[in-house]
Image: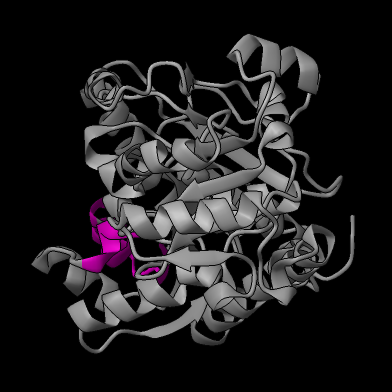
Amino acid sequence: MTLRPRDKSDQRGSARRSRAAGAVCVLLTEVSDRGGIEVYAKAFLVSLARAYRGKQLSVILHRNRTPPSVELPSDANIRFFCCGHSCRVLQILRFVRHLYGLLLRRPVIVLSNHVDLLKPCWFTCRAVGVPYGVIVYGIDAWNPKAAVRAILRGATAIASISRYTSERLADAVTKLPSTCLLPPPATEARMGCVLSEGELRERLRAEDGPVILTVCRLSKTERRKGYDTVLEAMPDILEKIPSATYVLVGEGDDVPRIRKRIEALGLRNHVRMPGYVPNEQLGSYYSIADVFVMPSSKEGFGIVFLEALMQGVPVIGGNVDGTRDALMNGQLGLMVTPGQPVEVTQAILNVIHGQLPDHLASPATVRERAVEAFGEQAFLANTARFLGLLGSMSGDLTACDVGGRS
């Protein structure tokens, strides 16, 4: 019998599959310093690079147009595939094309950081027999549709940003796979402080008196953040402290309505809306704040709470959602009932007047407690637990020690 030599294209395909052995494919919506999920994805990417030293990481970025600016270990082996495009159809087509191309090379496992990416992830993973892991955040995972519930059940493991999200997900989806917590890291990395306190106060016309700060998206879908409740509390606060200023940082399609609300409440001279604040200036806003307040009712976690705590700013948050995780059930900040201006008023006055419980009296001590619970080492340890679940289920996927620094 005569053996026919293998076609060169077959040889190249075999070589590609061999090179991809042990590779990890990661699907991320976006990696940047702009918002909570984007910052979280950036921290997770760095942790993966440290955990899988020497292994090939193929990262598909759904919204990035260019590779992100990320400080990675010197021995990181990452290839980025950017799908961002002004045309949504082309963006989706790019994403599917890259995903299929990578999965045909048989990575060991696929990780998805958003439920929006689960359907193409599940379809292609199932087609080539590759297991997948999922990270869930907030409201998008609290009441998933039937198709998404089925996909979540089929995951190898799930990481949740908070206990609250884990509980909501467990209520909505039966027979979930192994789930672990992966809260965000407490970091100052995305914040600069290029404006002096005096310069910023002058710019905001808040030279005298305490500053009350909120940083969030001002979107019609984000009114649950609680900034309306703070606005309703301001008249009573001003009765006690006429020089107080509320600084509401953010942008979105809810801004026109908010401005009308400010006028209706007679707060034109006491509320400042600087709009979007670039990262290099964000630290300056925290530095002038006497209190950070966001009495949210539907928060998956609340990374901004950690940002404020890392700057030594006292924090007030809600008591019904993932904020409880971020504030460790009151160990890191005051908690109030969302939608209750009277409670918000009293909490803000207590902070400004220094009338705090003993465990919150020292900002430095609170900051140390936040670093211990949510600092870089804690995030790396939690990442290792998640990867351990994935590794124990997927056979030849083994993470390196993530505790050491690069």
Which residue appears farthest toward the left when viewing the image? 146
Of 129 and 406, the residue lying toward us: 406
Task: Residue 106: tell me if it is visible.
Answer: no
Residue drawn at x 27%, y 55% is: 339
Q: Position of residue 103 (x, y in %)?
A: 41, 54
Is 138 magenta? The answer is yes
- Quarter of the N terminus within the rendering: bottom left
Determine whether, in the image, residue 383 is placed left or right of residue 237. right
Which residue appears farthest toward the right when viewing the image? 405
Q: Position of residue 399 (x, y in %)?
A: 70, 73
Q: Looking at the picture, does residue 310 appear above or below residue 197?
A: below
Is 3 magenta? The answer is no
Q: Looking at the picture, does residue 250 appear above or below residue 302?
A: above
Residue drawn at x 76%, y 51% is: 312
Of 224 and 131, the residue lying toward us: 224
Give, as a single range, the part of the protein colored magenta. Answer: 119-142
- Quarter of the C terminus within the rendering: bottom right
Of 112 and 3, the residue lying toward us: 112
Q: Position of residue 174 (x, y in %)?
A: 20, 86
Residue drawn at x 78%, y 71% is: 372
Task: Residue 168: tell me if it is visible.
Answer: yes
Q: Position of residue 315 (x, y in %)?
A: 59, 55
Of 9 and 400, the residue lying toward us: 400
